[in-house]
Image (tube, rainbow, N blue to C red):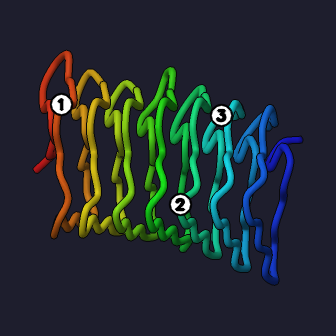
Amino acid sequence: AEDGGCVQMYSGEATISGGEIKNCQATKNGGAIYIAGGNFYANGGLIYNNKAESGAAVYIADGTFEMQNGSIKNNEATLNGAGIAIGGSGSFTMSGGSINNNISVNGNGGGIYVASGNITMNNGNIESNEAVNGGGFYLTEGSFEIKNGSLISKNKAQNGGGGYLLGGTFNLTGGTTSKNIATNSGGGYYIVD
């Protein structure tokens, strides 16, 4: 598939509880899941070993994706957002759970890539992801809020091990940033003025 290797969503509501979405592939966006509208809810479950150009696990062009205590891991993007990529007016809310061990080989945002739209993260972990810029996440426009007991750690990039802030709005009201690595600059966060 070009977009959405296993799941394509354009409207309505969908809920998955537990289970696995794995080994899916898209030539463009959303290796496992492509959301262009509607509301997608994931309670628990595992999204892993998926591949795409951008958004190897999940690509949100529009609509919403809400995840509770699930795991997005071992996904690979050739460009941006190996775990999750967001564009348009999409939104992602994460309560608990983890985004870990994802890699954006030639691009940005190993864990999460935000071109626009918004993200809210509550008590989740973004850990051990890797990218050229923004190992944990990369924010171009839109908003990213991290609160409560969230953890951003052990992510790796050339610039902005934890996160790379090109623009948009970033709010860190709780949580911990630790042990992120940048081989060039900005171990924790790299901020472009």
Q: Earlier in the sequence, mark 3 or mark 2?
A: 3
Residue 119's image quarter? bottom left
Element carrying mark 3: loop
Whether pointer 2 and pointer 1 mark residues with C-beta atoms closer than 8 Å, the reply is no
* Residue annotated with mark 1: 179
Counting from the top left corner in percent of width and height, residue 137 is at 36, 45
> Crowding near pointer 2: few (<14 within 10 Å), some, many (20+)?
some
Q: Nearer the viewer, mark 3 or mark 2?
A: 2
Counting from the top left corner in percent of width and height, residue 3 is at 80, 48
Q: Is residue 77 above or below residue 191?
A: above
Front in this rendered view, residue 148 or 79: 148
Counting from the top left corner in percent of width and height, residue 145 is at 29, 68
Q: Is residue 33 above or below residue 190?
A: below
* Residue annotated with mark 3: 53
Q: Is residue 158 above or below residue 68?
A: above
Farthest residue in the bottom direction?
12
Q: Nearer the viewer, mark 2 or mark 1?
A: 2
- Residue at 64% from the left image edge and 71% from the top image edge: 62
Counting from the top left corner in percent of width and height, residue 146 is at 27, 64
Front in this rendered view, residue 52 or 15: 15
Element carrying mark 1: loop
Residue 154's image quarter? top left
* Residue annotated with mark 2: 69
Q: At label 2, which amino acid type do we have?
A: Asn
Residue 37's image quarter? bottom right
CA distance for labels 2 and 1: 23 Å
